[in-house]
Amino acid sequence: MSMVRRFALFILVFALVSDVLHSTGEGGEDVVRVLGSCGAAAQPQSAAPHGAAGCGCGELKRAEHAEDSTADPPAEPAEKYSRGANERPDEEMQSRMVLISGGEFLMGTDNPGIPADGEGPQRLVHVHSFYMDIQEVTNQQFESFVSASGYITEAEKFGDSFVFEGLLSENVKNQITQATKTRQQRIDCFISAVMCSPIMWTEKVAAAPWWLPVKGANWRHPHGPDSDIKDRLDHPVLHVSWADAVAYCSWLHKRLPTEAEWEYACRGGLKDRLYPWGNKLNPKGQHYANLWQGDFPNHNTGEDGYVETSPVMSFPANGYGLYDMVGNAWEWTSDWWTVHHTADEQHNPTGPPSGKDKVKKGGSYMCHKSYCYRYRCAARSQNTPDSSASNLGFRCVSPEQQ
């Protein structure tokens, strides 16, 4: 048998095995793999656990994260943009902050909407006083930061970010290469020894096929390369990773909130309530947050006035004067993710010392009770620190008024 024929046979076997690996994980669970040029497989992502249905944004992880981190990501980017070497924005470009007076509250819940997310047990937590941005960081504010500092986001460095399919133009959809090539096409690709398309062969997220990795999607182009933010300057900035958020906050001598601080602020002084305004989603028929209405993910009726993000402060503030604490865009926190919590009383908890995912809170415009009941103060989700998506943003806190 010639060398070429042996090589072709080897590739055939490799392709067949790859198909098997593609469809099942070690325990038989559904998985999704990100494929590099000519099919180099990354780590699988398990499908969402039973009872934890969601919009799928917790599954949006870049392939590089296969092991737990032993500490926070390197602090250099944040330090670089907070050393005073760069121009800081005019005062009017910064978010107004309000004092959140310290106190105690019941964190979490004993009646979790999604038990697999680690919403419980409910525990007594004390937090110190701090100041919090009254709104999510906007495109205009982030643009000011980038213009002054030259910062480049991780989505821009990676060259892509996740976008909800319903927001994409037909032109962008047609340019996306999904991992739907047939077995024979993959074999031909190897045998002919030609490089595959420079666009990654990327599967839709197994549990959420409405999420697509889009080349050229980033904070400047939230729906892909043919979109911009000219008419969205007062919307929350999107496609920012955890490190991007840390860099921005540090530039202003601020930081991300801990999960405890975020949840304390979300509750707005109310005790053991679902939402920042109480237990009824739409009191007296009024919408208090930008959420999904209709049939998710097929049709958002926009009964609240929006089918995607809304300008910040479009809905009523909570008791502390904070806007959009739930809905509109998910918000990063500083905590590493865990679903195991002590029921003991705690003072200023900061989460586990290490992990692989960071906690995000608040839900987004994509949340609906039938599929992602995470627009509650006690609800939570997670992403790897370098993840970014078209429904993920942040706001900052500070120990003192800025």
Image (tube, rainbow, N blue to C red):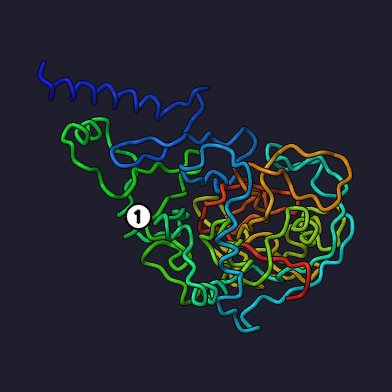
Question: Residue drawn at (55%, 58%), measured in percent from left and top?
Answer: 391
Outermost residue, top side: 1
Quarter-of-image position of residue 10 = top left
Instruction: Give the SS element for disc 1.
Output: helix
Left or right of 86 on screen, residue 3: left
Q: How crowded is mark 1: few (under 14 residues within 10 Å), some or many (20 or more)?
A: some
Q: Give x and y (percent) for residue 52.
A: 63, 39
Which quadrant, please, contains the C terminus? bottom right
Q: Give x and y (percent) for residue 201.
A: 34, 43
Given residues 333 and 390, the one toward you in this image is: 333
Q: Give x and y (percent) for residue 231.
A: 48, 76
Residue corresponding to mark 1 = 173
Residue 147, compared with residue 358, is above or below; it is below
- Amino acid found under the numbered disc labelled 1: Lys
Q: How many marks?
A: 1
Q: Give x and y (percent) for residue 173.
A: 35, 55
Which quadrant, please, contains the N terminus? top left
Question: Residue drawn at (87%, 62%), measured in percent from left and top?
Answer: 102
Question: Residue drawn at (54%, 77%), measured in percent from left and top?
Answer: 144
Left or right of 254 on screen, residue 198: left
